Structure formats: structure tokens, C-alpha cells
Amino acid sequence: MNKKIKTLNLTPGEFFDRLTILIRKTKFEPKAYEKRLQEFIEILNQNKLDGKFIRLICELQMANTDIWNLESKIRGKEEGELGLAEVGRRAIKIRNYNTIRIDKINKLNDCFGQSKYREEKFEHLSTEKEV
């Protein structure tokens, strides 16, 4: 790709590196970084790159990475090494990250006019009594 973009006097690589860092920071301190992040998104929009779309892609990647990190630590340990309490805490975090992940997937579908395709994550509740 041989496209030149305006990037606040940064190379495109530096621009996207800082963009992904800003997106990560807004996860933990939205009020502190959201305004600066919006400046970066506006630059993307000015370059005919959909800033909302790129942000959603980055946020989806972060959610998947967070899920992977939590799950891999569970899978990587010998059975019982983490303890049930820690596995339970991780399971709750994984569920919460999955909620974020599903939200980003649905918003990306919206970007492509595919709102009728809604991803949903839910717990299967059996109505049968276990024997």
C-alpha cells in the first residue's frame, strides 16, 4: 500500500502505535484520554479511513487478547494448581470480556449495514433435572 496519510507529523506506524495505546488507555481511564483519542479518530476520518471502524477493530482485538490471556493461564496450569476461587474469578472476567467482545462484533456488523445479524452470548440453562 503506497498511500500517504496525514498523521500529526508522525509516521503512519507511529500514528497507529499511539492510536492503539490511546484506545487501551481509554479502557482504564476514559475521561482522561477520550478527547485525545477523538482527535486521532478525526484524523483517520479526514484521511477517508473510518475512525469508528478502526477503533472497533482495536477494541475487539483487546477483548480477545484479554480473554486469551485469562484462558491460557487456566489451560496452562496443571489441574488444581490455580484453585477453584481463582478459576472462578477468571471465569467472571472472561464472561465480562466476552460481553465487550460481542458488543464490538455487533457494532462492526452495524458498520457494514448488517444490523440484522446479532451475536449473542448466553448461558445454557437446562430445564431438566440432573440425575
Image (cartoon, rainbow, N blue to C red):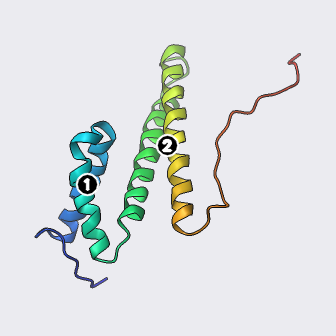
Q: Secondary structure at mark 1?
A: helix
Q: Please, which residue is most extreme toward the left here? A: 9
Crowding around mark 1 (Cα neighbors within 10 Å: few <14, some 14 to 19, many 20+) is: many
Question: Do the residues under discs 1 and 2 have CB atoms within 8 angstroms?
Answer: no
Residue 44 on image: x %, y %: 29, 69
Q: Is residue 22 above or below residue 52?
A: above
User: Which mark's residue is nearer the viewer, 1 or 2?
Assistant: 1
As drawn, the label of residue 23 is none
State the residue position of label 2. Answer: 100
Residue under pointer 1: 37
**Residue 83 is at least partly visible in this image:** no
Q: Quadrant of residue 3?
A: bottom left
* Left or right: residue 8 compared with residue 26: left
* Residue found at x 40% / y 47%: 62
- Please tell me how crowded label 2 is: few (under 14), some (14-19), or many (20+) other residues with Cα within 10 Å: some
Name the residue at the bottom extreme.
Answer: 2
In the rendered view, does 69 fall on the left or right side of 109?
A: left
Position of residue 122 relative to residue 64, above or below, is above
Q: Residue at x 49, y 21 (%)?
A: 89
- Image coordinates for residue 84, horizontal then vertical, percent: 54, 15
Tell me the residue at 40%/51% (across/down). 59
Q: Earlier in the sequence, mark 1 or mark 2?
A: 1
Q: In the visual, does 33 lie left or right of 128?
A: left
Say above or below: 128 vs 76.
Answer: above
Disc 1 marks a residue whose amino acid type is Leu
Quarter of the image that includes the N terminus: bottom left
Where disc 2 sits, the SS reads: helix
Between marks 1 and 2, how big is the CA–CA gap?
A: 19 Å
Residue flagged by tag 2: what amino acid is it?
Ile
Please identify the quadrant where the C terminus is shown: top right
Residue 96: x %, y % from top left: 51, 34
Name the residue rendered at 67%, 61% in the picture.
116
